[in-house]
Amino acid sequence: MVAKAVAVASPATTEAKYSEARVRLTNDLQKIADEVTFLNPDRPAWKPLLDSRRIVGTVLVLEEVFKVKLPPDRLVRKGGYNNVKEAVENIIRRHKGLIAEKNKPKKVRS
């Protein structure tokens, strides 16, 4: 049985990357929120401020920072979000979960 080594980024580096990603996501999502508010000032309360279809492109920020491709539909909650902070925190949390899942060592049958 051969053991595989898994490269894991140091926590300081990873947290610095998440801080950068958080700032960049916040800026991009705030632009979208401002645009939606400007174009549709009478938006009904039931309609999300940040529609999932509009914000899928912003997750490319995470690809640029971490150099890892992940499916956007697994990062963005279907339906969208009501505010920027909620969106950023949810996307970052999902990203951390997917990275952990991806880095989990595979079990090898002998």
Image (tube, rainbow, N blue to C red):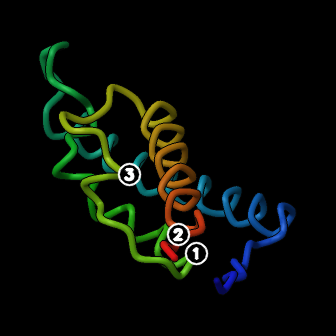
Residue 2, above or below 74: below
Q: Locate residue 39, reporting x and y percent.
A: 15, 40
The earlier-in-sequence mark between 1 and 2 is: 1
Seen from this angle, which residue lies furthest bottom? Answer: 2
Q: Mark 1 points at which residue?
A: 65
| Image coordinates for residue 27, horizontal then vertical, percent | 50, 54
- Which is closer to the viewer, label 2 or label 3? 2
Q: Which residue is drawn at 83% across and 61% down?
A: 11
Reading the image, the residue beneath label 2 is 106
Q: In which quarter of the image is residue 56?
A: bottom left
Residue 97: which numbered mark, if any?
none
Mark 3 lies on a secondary structure that is helix
Percent from the top left, x then y, of residue 33? 33, 41
Mark 1: give few (<14), some (14-19) or many (20+) Cα within 10 Å: some
What amino acid does circle 3 point to? Answer: Lys
Q: What residue type is labelled 1?
A: Val
